[in-house]
Image (cartoon, rainbow, N blue to C red):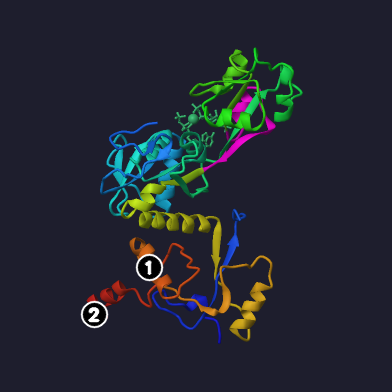
Amino acid sequence: MSLCPPAFTPAFSISTPCPSIHISVSKRSFISCCSSQSQTAVVNGKLDARIVERDEIRIGLPSKGRMAADTLDLLKDCQLSVKQVNPRQYVAEIPQLSNVEVWFQRPKDIVRKLVSGDLDLGIVGLDTVSEYGQENEDLIIVHDALEYGDCRLSIAIPKYGIFENINSLKELAQMPQWTVEKPLRVVTGFTYLGPKFMKENGLKHVMFSTADGALEAAPAMGIADAILDLVSSGTTLKENNLKEIEGGVVLESQAVLVASRKALVQRKGVLDTTHEILERFEAHLRAVGQFTVTANMRGSSAEDVAERVLSQPSLSGLQVSADYYAIVICVPKMALYKSVQQLRAIGGSGVLISPLTYIFDEETPRWRELLSKLGL
Ligand SMILES: Nc1ncnc2c1ncn2[C@@H]1O[C@H](COP(=O)(O)OP(=O)(O)OP(=O)(O)O)[C@@H](O)[C@H]1O
Ligand SMILES: O=P(O)(O)OC[C@H]1O[C@H](OP(=O)(O)OP(=O)(O)O)[C@H](O)[C@@H]1O
Ligand SMILES: [Mg+2]
């Protein structure tokens, strides 16, 4: 059995039988309290079995800030573009997902509204889920690595003065300065995660205060000894003469897709919609930074070619086996997901999707038309 010469595979044809040689070459390493109009979902810390009655499925997206644009970009890349009439309107739709309402909210309100049952799904940073979700068992992380909004929640102290030689949480805890009367003063916006972390790490004499932004100024202003805030590039800390310490990272964070367990289980359509969103996210994120390589390979049989490809360390593809046959089809953008589902249903696996740059027919239809008009 010989391999199909890829350069001659007609765009609309199904070429069979043709063993599939799907090779993915990595460009970079693959990573490897509040309730509004609803009934309250949490009563005395326990989950309320009731679900807020409504027909639409609701997803909360960040309304402003650095997560907002990246979230819309991700959805767009997954062919789930959000249709927002104007930027001040807080409700929108995703035409590709029927019966889904998009609600633009502040990240912390997305988490609160998931808990209260006013939203079913949301996209926010893991830090926000952890801080405002407070380990609520109704919150489920559906996708934990959307690959943007990377940052860490980390303790930082001044580089100078009594902290000059302090480089770890252990050393910070052992400083004789901290007593009942004069505790370590930490300023943070994370008033749930902060005290929890200090307690778990055995720091006894700690006092927390809170502020909404520019926390890095607090030590120099004499308001706090340390800060607990999000760090990404580290520039803000550096510019304010602060340093992170060993063992001081409370949480590594990036954007996540989070859902209400109750909505997934009880609300009609939420599980199916979540499945579709998840599939699209995973398919897109798996493909980022990968190239599809199609090659003509010399060989005496399909098995021979598969064996030789598998013997190369960088050629670990999705499937390389004589049991698979390559097909090449073209599908319209809008029908992409449906087409993948249909391919799977008839035995498809390892479906690689790349944008199509050109479709050259055997002959341009309009050329024939022109020739005919010219009587040629
Ligand atoms: N420096 C950072 N780099 C990357 N991601 C960050 C950074 N700071 C925060 N994030 C992530 O972005 C999310 C939103 O950040 P934040 O709530 O600070 O929004 P913002 O864009 O700064 O607006 P504002 O603070 O004014 O509300 C955070 O929960 C976190 O997951
Ligand atoms: O490590 P870096 O890349 O310097 O980023 C860290 C800074 O980013 C966030 O602030 P943000 O820009 O959101 O300002 P804010 O305090 O007004 O929210 C965070 O609160 C830090 O201050
Ligand atoms: Mg901010």
Q: Which residue is mark 2?
A: 375
Callout 2, which amino acid?
Answer: Gly
Return the disc, 1 or 2, that comes first in the chain's sequence. Answer: 1
Q: Is residue 46 visible?
A: yes
Helix, strand or loop under label 2: loop
Q: Say whether residue 241 is magenta.
A: yes
In the picture shown, does residue 208 fall above or below 335?
A: above
- In front of the other: 354 or 207: 207
Helix, strand or loop under label 1: helix
What residue is at 28 percent from the left and 52 percent from the top?
99
- Quarter assignment of residue 115: top left
Report how far apart the C-alphas of labels 1 and 2 lie in the structure.
Answer: 41 Å
Q: Which residues are magenta?
A: 231-254
Q: Is residue 80 visible?
A: no
Specify few, some or many for label 2: CA neighbours under 10 Å numbering under 14, 14-19, or 20 or more. Answer: few
State the image coordinates of residue 6 (x, y, percent, origin top left): 51, 76
Callout 1, which amino acid?
Answer: Ser
Q: Which residue is mark 1?
A: 339
How many marks the image carries: the answer is: 2
In the picture shown, does residue 128 fall above or below 371?
A: above
Q: Residue furthest right?
A: 165
- In front of the other: 173 or 60: 173
Q: Say whether residue 218 is magenta.
A: no
**Is 259 displayed left or right of 94 in the figure?**
right
**Is 329 displayed left or right of 187 in the figure?**
left
Query: Does any atom of ligand 1 lie closer than 8 Å to the CB of label 1?
Result: no
Specify few, some or many for label 1: CA neighbours under 10 Å numbering under 14, 14-19, or 20 or more. Answer: some
**Is 4 displayed left or right of 364 in the figure?**
right
